[in-house]
Image: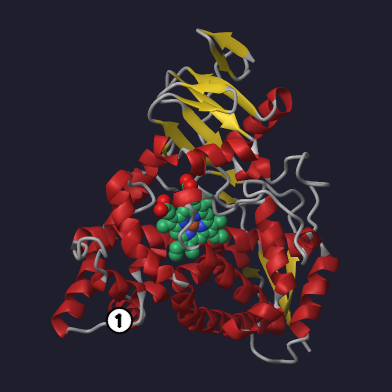
Amino acid sequence: MVAFNNHIYPPGPDIPVELDAGDDTIDQITKLFRQFGNIYKVYSERRKSYTYVINDPEMIKHVLITNNRNYTKGVGIDRVKILLGNGIMGSEGEYWKKQRRMVQPAFHRKVTERLSRSIVTANQKMAAEWGVMAKQGEAINLTAELSRLTLNIVLQSLFSTDLNLIEKQHRMHPFMLLTEEHARDLNFALKFRSLASEIRNIMQRRAQDGRTEDDFLSMLMTARDPETGEGMSDKEIIDELLTLIVAGHETTASALNWAWYLLATHPQVYQQMKLEIQALNGMPPGFGQLQQLGFVKQVIDETMRMYPPGWLLTRKSITDDQIGRYHVPAKTDIFISPFLMHRHPDYWENPEQFMPDRFSYPQKDRGRFEYFPFGGGPRQCIGDYFAQVEMQLHLAIITQKYDLQVVVPEQITMEARINLRNPNPLYTFLSLRK
Ligand code: HEM
């Protein structure tokens, strides 16, 4: 604790530390947490400013909910904006509020229930393709397949029948660059933004034909702001769609990748999940079966506890504030890490162990910001329910059909950029379940 000008400041190292929301950051913030505890500050020479790293549920609630109006998005958001323009991930203030209001209905539970049919179809199609590869004894690049699957699911939800048209026009559909290129640099952003013209063509075709479909694109094209009655411009729709493509596919793909890794390294858990799916007695998993797939949900919850794809939330204070006892000057960067909180020894027993039973019913009374893989407050993930349904159905459909023998790497590494992912692909062999 440091007092100055009658203000109390959090403790922290005496020397500057560069926290870049990049690969080293998890190691750095974990070490500093062990040294300084639930809130500490570090000075960045490069940014010429302080960052507070907060690992306390009440303080996190203050930033994300109680006084959220005093915080904008923080470090790293400029990179997101180059990629996603003014979509809801990076926009702020009244504009963000209006856009979020317009996009929100597309994520209503009833809509997700309807769209779950295309989640099932995409998984069945992939499972059939795997069957052919497995017969030839080929190892399957599971990481690449999950990326392809989740991208297809989000594109189906966005463009439904028009996706087939795009696929017919190009030998391979142009959005595949998202699964094929891993750098998220300026060069990628330029290529990615050029997909806007593809979306513009679909919108023009629909407008000319007066055609609406049961998908996100039609929902956004017909959305009206309940307060003003106004619709969105083409540019606004395109920015929101590009946002949903990126936000919706990489996160889900990396969570599923971690889930398969953890199942492969915990055969008893995998066995317990198989037994739950076997109890469906051959009924193909769909939206109606989700209630019977409680253990599958626990596996997903525990996976995202250990490896939350959204491992870091960054904010910046607008004016002076106070968090707990500590003064926060304007323009202070704030780091809130679900990764750190999800392994905080005060809230989790054996935090380094994969134990889906900790999420079993009845759930332990858990504070709101002890577990928050989808963030919280007004900027909470808009696709949280969609993602949960998607992940539960994927694990159930594949497990009902196949036993996966994932080739487990000797050591698993974490790449912490926009998402927390495993940079080396996982491969798997398959056998049909009897
Ligand atoms: C496992 C899957 C997912 C995880 C872990 C995840 C995680 C998150 C997190 C932590 C945030 C909050 C970021 C912050 O507060 O700074 C967020 C925001 C967001 N997510 Fe997700 N997400 C997932 C899936 C999805 C899906 C499927 C979609 C859409 C199809 C989506 C769309 C968005 C959008 C648009 C935002 C910005 C919301 C706003 O600022 O108003 N996400 N996500």
Residue 10 occupies quadrant: top right
In the rendered image, which quarter contains the C terminus? bottom right
The mark tally for this picture is: 1
Left or right: 189, with 148 as reference point: left
Left or right: 96, with 20 as reference point: left
Q: Which residue is mark 1?
A: 165
Where is residue 312? Give x, y as percent.
55, 42
Q: Amino acid at mark 1?
A: Leu
Left or right: 285, with 236 as reference point: right
**Is residue 19 or residue 33 the one in the foreground?**
33
Q: Residue at x 63, y 30 (%)?
A: 28
**Is residue 233 or residue 252 the one in the foreground?**
233
* Relative to 343, residue 117 above or below: below
Q: Residue at x 35, y 53 (%)?
A: 88
Neighbourhood count class around disc 1 (C-alpha, 10 Å): few under 14, some 14–19, many 20 upward: few
* Relative to 101, residue 17 above or below: above
